[in-house]
Image (cartoon, helix red, strand yellow):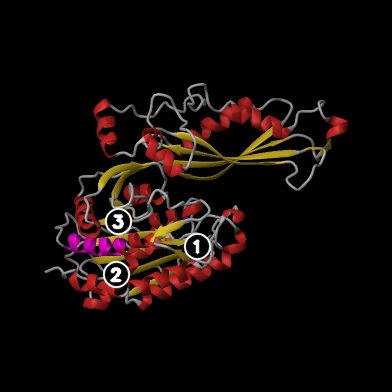
Amino acid sequence: MALPPSRALAYARAHRQDFLSELEEFARIPTVSAQPKHRADIRACAEWLAAHLSRIGLETVRIVPTAGNPLVYAAHAADDARPTLLIYGHYDVQPPDPLAEWHSPPFTPTRRGADLFGRGVCDDKGQLLTHIKALESYLAATGALPINVRCLFEGEEEIGSTHLFPFVARHPRTLAADAAVMSDTRMLGPGRPAISYAERGALYLEFSVRGAEQDLHSGNFGGAVHNPLQALCEIIAKLHDSDRRVAIPGFYDRVCSYFDDERARMARAAPSDRDILADARAHAPWGERGHTSYERITLRPALIVNGITGGYQGPGTKGIIPARATAKLSFRLVPRQDPLEVERLVRKHLAALTPPTVRSSIRTLSAAAPAVVDPRHPAMRAAAVAYRKGFGAAPAFIRSGGTIPILDALQRTLGVPTVLMGFALPDDRMHAPNEKFHIPNFFRGIDTSIWFMAELANWRSPRRAAGRITFPERQRD
């Protein structure tokens, strides 16, 4: 018989303030994976997380060194006859810049009203912690878990999960599971839970244009040589056509056309153009003609200019023609688009657009494939029941415009369907200044995770992650 969740729920509700304080402690560690200066902080956070998992009573806890940031692995056995759940999350965060726009220091978690503000409180430390606190609630209240659990937490999700993929490929037995769950997505709004069944892929590139060997005096050479910063802007301006489609030959060759009934079904659960505009706090919509805003961020691919640098950035003036200019470009990709194939198309097109007056180069930063999960899977149905009990509302099944690099690897390499249980609100400002997590959602997320494990315990799995857990003590990936 499965363990009843009532005692675990009672424990969670009695310890809510303790859980919130632990989230604040977790979020104080500045785990910015994109910045090498935070390598020591990332290591300290991995140690904090491992110690926390040991303290709540998980049987097996390991910090796994990699050539990059460490992984944290944990496992707890209940009964070989019961399903095994793999819990994934990431403890690294986005850079907090621009710092001047924060109302409180990004790594000093601050409560204001019903929200907790700070970098990573939502993406993904708060959402990750909902599952850890659910595990703690079961173990503290009943001394056992209703299912077998394996945890995999990484410190490189925000930079492409480079060293997680080889670990997954090399250790399928260690990570064997009947289903996986991750919470790194959004709800539709307050009291409107959602389960994402599709995520877009991503490709991140750095495109540089170079002119002279050094900055030039703009009085001596202005008008006589091509400014690399201007050339870069001219190239970028040609990357979209008049219909706001990506103007790279072959880019849309593998993009699926969706039938009207699919678009109509999506529209019933989708936020409106007005809702999306309000969430973005933008003045007017923009994007590929012939599609709604929701379709543009889920069914359609996109090219985004994430940043441009070049020339003098300090106060006052400096009369130069910069020697170099760089743009960071990202592509959000939809099912059937291969990031490696798109990269080849982009390289060919940017080379063709580069005028003979300058030289250009491209560096690939990261890539991730798109992924789709069958919404009819029993684990998805268990999640829907858990949401109804945790939030008091049935979830909508939606597509997401974001990218979770490991999602495709779990499905393709391990054959594990992944449930995306989001607890973030659309206005939680993930990746932006003043990121926040709605505190009631943190607590309801813990309750929902408890219910999810209880529902999974009643699932008769078509396969069992049988056998004793094996773990390579000194394996480096």
On residue 295, the disc is: none
Task: Tell me the residue at 19%/64% (across/down).
Answer: 454
- Classify 309 as above or below 446: above
Q: Position of residue 447 (x, y in %)?
A: 26, 64
Q: Nearer the viewer, residue 320 or 352?
A: 320
Q: Dot 2 corresponds to which residue? A: 135
Instruction: Please rate how many residues cluster around mark 3, counting C-alpha atoms within 10 Å: few if below 14, some from 14 to 19, many from 20.
Output: many
Q: Nearer the viewer, residue 119 or 226?
A: 119
Q: Dot 1 corresponds to which residue? A: 66
Closer to the N terminus: mark 1 or mark 2?
A: 1
Single out the residue that lies furthest toward the top.
Answer: 242
Residue 60 sits in quarter: bottom left
What is the distance, in whole Å, between disc 1 and disc 2 at their CAs?
26 Å
What secondary structure is the stretch in magenta mostly built from?
A: helix
Was residue 451 drawn as part of the magenta stretch in this picture? yes
Task: Tell me the residue at 24%/55% (across/down).
Answer: 387
Q: Position of residue 121 (x, y in %)?
A: 44, 61
Secondary element type, mark 3: strand
Q: Point out the stretch of residues depicted in magenta.
A: 444-457
Q: Are marks 1 and 2 in contact (CB under 8 Å)?
A: no
Residue type for callout 2: Leu
Secondary element type, mark 2: helix
